[in-house]
Amino acid sequence: MPLLDNPQFGEKIVTLMAALVLVLQIAMVAQRWIITNIRIFAAQSLLLAAIAGMVAHFNGAAHIYAAAVLTLVVKTVLVPILLERLVERIDIRREIEPILNVPLSILISGGLTLIAYIVAESFHRPEQAGGAANLGHNALAVAISLFLIGFFMMINRRKALTQVLALLSLENGLFLAAISLTYGMPLIVELGVLFDVLVAVMVLGILVYRIRESFESMDVSRLRRLRG
Amino acid sequence: MTAVLSAFAQLVLLLALAPLISGFIRKFKARFQTRRGPGLLQPYRDLFKLFRKGMVIPETSSWIFSATPWVVFGTSVAAGLLVPMVSTAPLGLFGGVLAVVYVLALGRFFLALAGLDTGSSFGGLGSSREMTISALAEPAMMLAVFTVAIGASSTSLSEIVRTAAGQSWRFLAPPQVLAFAAMFIVLIAETGRIPVDNPATHLELTMIHEAMILEYSGPYLALIEWGASVKQLALMSLLINVFWPFGLQPEWSGAGVLAGLGWLLVKLLLLSCAIVLVETTNAKMRLFRVPELLAVGFTLSALGLVSTFLL
């Protein structure tokens, strides 16, 4: 397969998948249903695993394959299943209620992406790059925008569960940045991060359930009542 | 001479192929929902039937009512001739992609006027909705168009397509992907497909396009329906040839046209399948949700445009 060994082709494919990840992130901002949001997150993680696989292939780094497989298992399968089960258990079918209305949120996400591109531009050194090292330039911009939009989603949403989703997509941004800048952190770090995510989802799941039990709602703005 | 011949060939292709594409989408959608659906040739039969029928023209209507079917049909065909389908655009001399957008806008303007002209409340309702949606879809479409035009540094469609065909893998570049996603959303809004409008409904609460043409019957209705399917074909060709310029012939010639036609059909089928997938898996949106969808389109195309400068 000569095509698969051509770094230029690899760069195009990685850039394309990074762009799709960004499209999915904006779709997540626009989407109102929690279940659909979880599935978009799963699709986004699948793309991330594919990006990691491509990067591993072009850099001949075996441990990134492991990271890719772990991402696939944990973020595309395990976390969405856990979250969907949680949604079923607390029986919410209602829509996400963002604080700002949806068109405005989408426009803000667009603005944040612009900022991300401008920031990423300052990291770009075309004279040093070449071959496989060039894979990550566009991916970094996407990673920063995932990060910023994730933050924005966390601020913009009232329900605890949807904030968990925002946190997860933010973490996807971190993973993408790590992959595109360093071509994979040491495996032990990756393992730590993934385990962290899994535990975070479980703990937050319990927390969400508790909040729901005590306040009859997942609306975190009601937590104000705890003030003395 | 070739210019005249090519214009004629594309005219025939547009008029003949447009109902078939509508029929294919309808049939495939039915199969997808495990219905049998009407035959592929049903749109031709419908047009033939309508052309032989008499007409009822409302007494209160003015010349606009009679002029609109011709304007709608004419603008759709003109837009179709401005778009490269199997080779260069035959009327490319008269304008580029901006002309396509605004020729279609002229047709839509007349359609909205005709909806108001009869004085029926449904017509006015349809016109107002159509104008709202098109006002929101237009910026998204223009930005997506500019994204591809910047790559070719020209707004001439033949030029854009030639540049796109010259660069392999260009259709995978992020600006192209973002602009493609935006254009797809605009395509769905402009052709009145399901998340935005339902082409098969006559339910007063939800119809948009159908509400405007409610008073039309007979040959006028046939002209409008045919025009709508030609418009759909023109927009689909615009999308596929600008973003996936494979198999597009650089010159009009005998053998080349056949190859180009084959590629065109394959790409149209692919795009139709995508449309069917979207139509089947989504429910029609509430009208107040449509701006959200179009805001996504706008943001995507704006990002596409900006990323051409930054990357």
Image (cartoon, coloured by chain):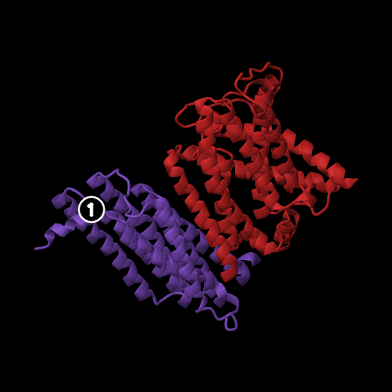
Chain colours: A purple, B red
List the single residue furthest toward the right.
Answer: B1
Q: Is residue B174 visible?
A: no
- Quarter holding the C terminus of chain B? bottom right
Nearer to the camera, A199 or B132: B132
* Residue B292 located left or right of residue B173: left
- Image coordinates of residue A201 in percent, x first then y, are 28, 60
Nearer to the camera, A130 or A107: A107
- Quarter holding the N terminus of chain B? top right
The quadrant holding residue B148 is bottom right
Look at the picture and state if B310 lies above or below A39. Answer: below
The quadrant holding residue A150 is bottom left
List the single residue furthest toward the left.
Answer: A228
- Image coordinates of residue A98 in percent, x first then y, are 33, 53
Mark 1 lies on residue: A219
- Residue depicted at 64% across the width and 39% down the height: B232
Count up the numbered dots. 1
Q: Residues within 10 Å of mark 1 (few under 14, many from 20)?
A: some
List the single residue furthest toward the top.
Answer: B54
Q: Is residue B140 visible?
A: yes
Nearer to the camera, B283 or A46: B283
Q: Amino acid at mark 1?
A: Asp
Secondary structure beneath label 1: loop
- Image coordinates of residue A156 in percent, x first then y, are 33, 58
Q: Chain of mark 1?
A: A
- Residue depicted at 58% across the width and 32% down the height: B26
- Image coordinates of residue B146 in percent, x first then y, are 63, 58
- Residue depicted at 31% across the width and 65% down the height: A197
- Residue depicted at 68% across the width and 19% down the height: B49
List the single residue furthest toward the bottom.
Answer: A128
